[in-house]
C-alpha cells in the first residue's frame, strides 16, 4: 500500500509514471504485478493502468479522465464531449477521442473507446482532469460527423439542450475546417435552433458567404428531402420534425 495513495491521486497512469514513483523500472514492474494481483490497479490497455477503489472495487477515474490520458494530445470530443458538458440526450457506452495517435478501438469497464483523427489544429479545454473539446468546437465537429457519430436525431437533441453559443468561436472553427459543405450543414441546422442558441443573423450571413456553388444533400439517406435555396441544400422541409417523431423517415446512419 506504500504507493497506493499516489496512484489514487493520479487515477490513470503509465509504466513510466510508476517508474518515476518507485525509482526504477524493476520496482515499477514489481508493483504492477503485486497491485494487479491484489486488485489495487487494472490494466486498461498497453502501458496504461487505472487505480481501483478498495471500497467499491470500481475504477477511480471517469471514462473521460481515462480518455484524456491515452495520449498527450488525446481530447474527449463529439458526443462524448456533449455528455461531459451535460448536453447529451442520452449517454452512450462509447467514448470518442480525438488524437493524432492511431489506436484500435478497445473496451474497458463497459465503454468502448474510439479514435477520431483531427482535421485541423484546435485548442482544447482542461476541466477536472479531462481534456475536452470546447463547446463550439464540439458543435461543429458533431455536425460534420453526425453520420458517423451519434446520428442526426441525437445531434439535434444535444444542440437543443445548449443555452447559447458564441458565434465568433463557431466561425473560427468553421474556418479551420475550411469546408463549404460544412458551412451549409451548420447554417441550415443551427438556423432551425437560432432562438434557443441566441445566434444573430450576422452568423448565418457569414456562413452563406462560404457556401460552394454545387448542390448537396444534408446526408446520404435523403428520403423526402426538399430544396432549400437559402442554403443550396437538399434537406428535410422542417428539421424539427425529426426530433418530434424520431428518424424513421430520415434514418441518420
Image: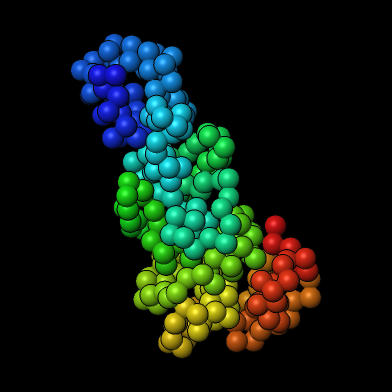
Residue 181 to residue 82: above or below? below
Residue 117 to residue 223: above or below? above
Q: Residue furthest left?
A: 23
Q: Is residue 171 visible?
A: no
Residue 142 to residue 208: above or below? above
Q: Residue at x 59, y 67 (%)?
A: 157
Counting the numbered discs, the total is 0
Residue 100 x, y percent position in the rendering: 42, 44
Q: Residue at x 39, y 43 (%)?
A: 65
Towards the viewer: 206 or 14: 14
Q: Is residue 214 visible?
A: yes
Towards the viewer: 33 or 138: 33
Residue 132 x, y percent position in the rendering: 39, 53
Q: Quadrant of residue 1?
A: top left
Residue 45 to residue 242: above or below? above
Protein image colouring: rainbow
Q: Residue furthest front?
A: 55
Left or right position of 12 against 236: left
Residue 11 x, y percent position in the rendering: 35, 35
Pick the quarter of the image with the C terminus: bottom right
Towards the viewer: 108 or 217: 108
Q: Residue at x 33, y 11 (%)?
A: 30
Q: Residue at x 61, y 62 (%)?
A: 154
Towards the viewer: 164 or 138: 164
Residue 47 x, y percent position in the rendering: 40, 26
Left or right position of 169 against 18: right
Amino acid at each position: 500500500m506504500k504507493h497506493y495513495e499516489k496512484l489514487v491521486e493520479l487515477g490513470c497512469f503509465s509504466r513510466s509514471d510508476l517508474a518515476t514513483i518507485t525509482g526504477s523500472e524493476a520496482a515499477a514492474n514489481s508493483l504492477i504485478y503485486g497491485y494487479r494481483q491484489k486488485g489495487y490497479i487494472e490494466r486498461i490497455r498497453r502501458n496504461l493502468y487505472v487505480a481501483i477503489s478498495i471500497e467499491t472495487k470500481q475504477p477511480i477515474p471517469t471514462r473521460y479522465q481515462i480518455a484524456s490520458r491515452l495520449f498527450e494530445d488525446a481530447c474527449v470530443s463529439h458526443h462524448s464531449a456533449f455528455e461531459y458538458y451535460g448536453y447529451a440526450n442520452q449517454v452512450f457506452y462509447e467514448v470518442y477521442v480525438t488524437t493524432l495517435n492511431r489506436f484500435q478501438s478497445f473496451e474497458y469497464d463497459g465503454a468502448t473507446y474510439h479514435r477520431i483523427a483531427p482535421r485541423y489544429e484546435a485548442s482544447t479545454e482542461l476541466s477536472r482532469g479531462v481534456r475536452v473539446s470546447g463547446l463550439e468546437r464540439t458543435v461543429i465537429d458533431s455536425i460534420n460527423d453526425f453520420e458517423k457519430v451519434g446520428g442526426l436525431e441525437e445531434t439535434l437533441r444535444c444542440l437543443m439542450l445548449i443555452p447559447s453559443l458564441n458565434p465568433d468561436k463557431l466561425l473560427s472553427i468553421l474556418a479551420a475546417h475550411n469546408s463549404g459543405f460544412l458551412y451549409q450543414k451548420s447554417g441550415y441546422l443551427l438556423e432551425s435552433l437560432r432562438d434557443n442558441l441566441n445566434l444573430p443573423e450576422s452568423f448565418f450571413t457569414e456562413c452563406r458567404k462560404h457556401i460552394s456553388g454545387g448542390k448537396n444533400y444534408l446526408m446520404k439517406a435523403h428520403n423526402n428531402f426538399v430544396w432549400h435555396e437559402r442554403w443550396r441544400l437538399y434537406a428535410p422541409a422542417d428539421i424539427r420534425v425529426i426530433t418530434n417523431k424520431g428518424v424513421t423517415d430520415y434514418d441518420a446512419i
